[in-house]
Image: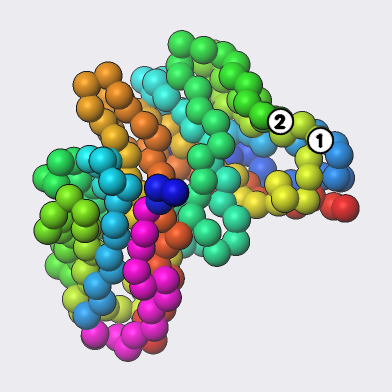
């Protein structure tokens, strides 16, 4: 069936390097995507979102890229810091006002 | 500081007991979601409400789970009877969908449920 999935379950990066977390989705009708960050013992926290009519959106140290041709979403974190260590989830809204569907998550570990 | 508040944060109970989890959505939000998180399944949607009306509870085992919104400031998720396989972290999230406004889902800290 259709699902939101992640290419890499774990990612280790050196402090100061850039991180790229990837996500594949299969529902071409999805019109809205969000990246969430979840730290240990906490709920998912909104990082950045993007609508399907865009292919790039930038925030503070984070950039989300959307490639609708290959149904791929990525989160780029610049100058990764120890505080960025967490599990990152991509989520999609498949149509209208339906709830978000979450991927399995990628754990980002930052090596000091 | 607007936030979604969930109680209790942790709950350990014996199999067969009733469990009630509570959620206070962000004031003004009209959409409330219940998600369950496990290592195997990730974040799964159990149910969601808009303007206190249930829109979809197809993710919940109907024989033992029930979700309600007694008023706009309280959402409850009840499991009766609880089973060990219900052990998970249960998250409540809220958002606003109204006219042209649509916010993302804001999550609470979760209730970690352990059924022994």
Chain of residue at mark 1: A
* Disc 2 element: loop
Residue drawn at x 81%, y 35% is A79
The residue where tag 1 is placed is A79
The correct choice, above or below, for A6 with respect to B102 in the image is below
Residue drawn at x 21%, y 58% is B74
Give the image location of residue A51, x and y in percent.
Answer: 45, 19
The correct choice, above or below, for A50 with respect to A83 in the image is above
Q: Which residues are magenta?
A: B4-17
Q: Please check the rendered image and state whether residue B16 is part of the magenta-colored stretch, yes or no.
A: yes
Mark 1 → mark 2, Cα distance in angstroms: 7 Å
The residue where tag 2 is placed is A61
Q: Are marks 1 and 2 on the same chain?
A: yes
Chain of residue at mark 2: A
Q: Earlier in the sequence, mark 1 or mark 2?
A: 2
Is there CB contact under 8 Å for labels 1 and 2?
A: yes
For disc 2, the neighbor class at 10 Å (few under 14, some 14 to 19, many from 20) is few
Give the side of residue B26 with respect to residue A49, left or right.
Answer: left
């Amino acid at each position: 069936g259709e699902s939101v999935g992640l290419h890499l379950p774990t990612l280790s990066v050196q402090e100061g390097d850039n991180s790229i977390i990837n996500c594949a989705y299969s529902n071409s009708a999805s019109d809205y995507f969000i990246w969430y960050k979840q730290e240990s013992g906490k709920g998912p926290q909104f990082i950045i979102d993007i609508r399907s009519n865009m292919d790039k959106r930038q925030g503070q140290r984070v950039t989300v890229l959307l490639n609708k041709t290959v149904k791929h979403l990525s989160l780029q974190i610049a100058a990764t810091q120890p505080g960025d260590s967490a599990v990152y989830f991509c989520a999609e809204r498949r149509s209208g006002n339906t709830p978000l569907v979450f991927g399995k998550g990628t754990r980002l570990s930052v090596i000091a | 500081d607007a936030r979604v508040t969930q109680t209790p944060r942790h709950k350990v109970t014996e199999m067969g007991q009733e469990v009630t989890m509570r959620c206070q959505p962000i004031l003004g939000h009209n959409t409330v979601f219940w998600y369950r998180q496990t290592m195997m399944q990730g974040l799964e949607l159990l149910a969601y409400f808009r303007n206190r009306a249930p829109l979809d509870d197809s993710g919940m085992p109907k024989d033992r789970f029930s979700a309600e919104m007694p008023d706009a400031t309280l959402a409850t998720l009840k499991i009766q009877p609880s089973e060990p396989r219900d052990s998970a972290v249960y998250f409540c999230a809220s958002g606003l969908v109204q006219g042209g406004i649509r916010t993302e889902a804001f999550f609470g800290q979760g209730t970690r449920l352990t059924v022994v």
